[in-house]
Amino acid sequence: MADDDIEVDARGLYCPLPVLRLARALRRQPAGRVARLLATDPVSVQDVEVFCREQRCTLLESSRDGEVFVFRVRSS
């Protein structure tokens, strides 16, 4: 995680809440900002990919740390 990443903690939440939290966090920021989403819902893997495609955001990273899925997304 970069020091200036926005962290969105959606652990314990289920679809569609992780992506909605990510969208809200990015909406409040200027273009080009990076958000780091933490989620435990396995569906978030597909949801984040679709979100990025539809919102023209860039999925910089997608990984898993135990039960937590970690995504880094740059806003458009």
Image (cartoon, rainbow, N blue to C red):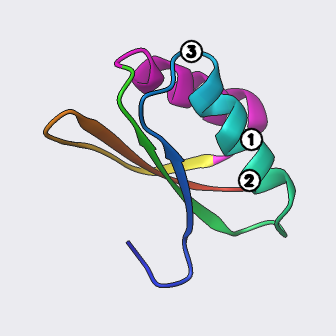
Q: Is residue 71 left or right of residue 51?
A: left
The secondary structure that dominates the magenta segment is helix
Label 3 element class: loop
Q: Quadrant of the N terminus?
A: bottom left
The amino acid type, in three-letter code, at marker 3 is Cys
Alpha carbon separation for disc pair 1 and 2: 5 Å
**Residue pointed to by mark 2:** 25
Q: Is residue 13 visible?
A: yes
The amino acid type, in three-letter code, at marker 1 is Ala
Q: Quadrant of the C terminus?
A: bottom right
Can you give x and y, in whole percent of width and height, for residue 59 in the image?
50, 46
Crowdedness near tag 2: few (<14), some (14–19) or many (≥20) residues, C-alpha within 10 Å: some
Q: Is residue 45 left or right of residue 16?
A: left
Span of residues in magenta: 42-57
Alpha carbon separation for disc pair 2 and 3: 16 Å
Q: State the residue at coordinates (63%, 17%).
A: 16
**Residue pointed to by mark 1:** 23
The amino acid type, in three-letter code, at marker 2 is Ala
15 up-or-down from 24: above or below:
above
Residue contact between numbered discs 1 and 2, judged by CB atoms under 8 Å: yes
Answer with mark 2 or mark 3, whichever residue precedes in sequence.
Answer: 3
Label 2 element class: helix
Can you give x and y, in whole percent of width and height, for residue 51 in the image?
65, 29
Q: Which mark is residue 15?
A: 3
Residue contact between numbered discs 2 and 3, judged by CB atoms under 8 Å: no
